[in-house]
Image: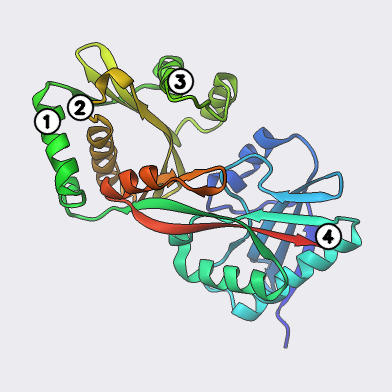
Amino acid sequence: MKTYSFHSGITETNAKYIFNTPKHLALQASEGWTCYYALNEKGKCLVFIWINTSNETALSPLHAPFGSMEADADIEPKVLYEFIEYVVESAKSSGIKKLLFKNPPEVYNSPMSGLLTTFLLNQGFSIAQAEISSVIPIDNRSYEQKITDWEHRKLKQVKSAGLHFERSSSGHLSKIYAFLEGCRKEKGYALSMSLKDVQALLQAFPDQISLFSIYQESELAAACIGIQVSQDILYTFYYDHAKIFDSYSPVVFLIEGIYEHCQANGIRLLDLGTAALNTQPNFSLLTFKNNLGGIPSSKFSFLKYL
C-alpha cells in the first residue's frame, strides 16, 4: 500500500543545509520559489527540493554553491525515484522547459548521493557540470598527520616566523573581505559576492559565518570566510593569502587552525571548495588542496530539457 504523497507549493521544510533554508532562499530571490515535497502518512517530509523558476527555466539553487534535493536518511529508494518523476512531470505541466539542479559534494551524504545521482541519470538528466571538491575528514588525528611532507615543512616555517592564527569577530568582516578581494585582484580574479551581499549573509546567519585570520604582528597574511553549511560541515567559502607572504605559504597554517576549530566544535567535514577553471580541472589548485589534506569528492550539476 502506498504510504506517501507528493505535493508542491510553499511549505515549511526542515532543511539540513543552510542554502535550502527559508532565510537563505530569501537572500537568493524574493519571489519565484516553489517547493516540491513528499509526505508519509504521518505528515513527515521524506524529501523536498526548492526550485526557482524564471523564463521557463527552473533552478535549484538560484544563487548558492548547491541546492537540489534533501531526503530523509530512511527514505525508501522507490519513493526517491518516484519523487523525481513527480518533480519532472509537475514542472513540465507548469510550462517549465529546463531543469538544472546543483548537488552538494557527494561525500556530504555518500549513500544518498549515490542514489540521487543514479536516479537522476536513470530519468534522463545529464551531467551539465562535473567538479572536484577537496574535503578534509575531521577525526582525532592532528592536522600535521593529514598533510604532505612539503606542506609540513611549510607549516613549521610559517610558525617559526612568528605568524599567529586567530578566529576574528564579525566586526572584522569588512577588513577581511577587502583583504581577500585584494588577494584575488593580485591573481586576476574577482570575488563572486559583493561586500553588501556577504554582510547580508552574516546578518541572516550570525552563528554560521566564521572569520579566520593569520597575522604577522598586525599585518594580515591570510584569511578565510567560512560558512557552516550544516551542523557538521564547514565550507571555506573564501580564503587566500597576500602575495608578499608567498614564501611562507600561510594558507597551510590557516587551514590547520580551521581544522582544529572543527575538532573542537564537532564538525566532521571541512570543505576546501572546488578546483576548476572554465569548467575544467585546475590541476595546480587541486593538487594544492589535496596536499593540504583534502580528499577528492565529485560535485555534479544535472540538466534536463522537458
Amino acid under disc 3: Tyr
Answer with mark 3 or mark 4, whichever residue precedes in sequence.
4
Whole-number angstrom distance, CA of label 2 to CA of label 4:
52 Å
Whole-number angstrom distance, CA of label 3 to CA of label 2:
21 Å
Q: Which residue is mark 1?
A: 157
Whole-number angstrom distance, CA of label 1 to CA of label 2:
7 Å
- Where residue 110 sits in the image (x, y, percent)? 45, 66
Amino acid under disc 2: Tyr
Amino acid under disc 1: Gln
In this view, the mark in front (2 or 4): 2
Q: Which mark is residue 286?
A: none
Q: Which mark is residue 177?
A: 3
Q: Give 163 or 23, whichever is nearer the viewer.
A: 163
Q: Which residue is mark 2?
A: 248
Task: Determine contact: label 1, label 2, CB under 8 Å.
Answer: yes
Answer with mark 1 or mark 2, whichever residue precedes in sequence.
1
Q: Is residue 213 toward the left or the right of residue 274 in the image?
A: left
Q: Is residue 27 toward the left or the right of residue 265 in the image?
A: right
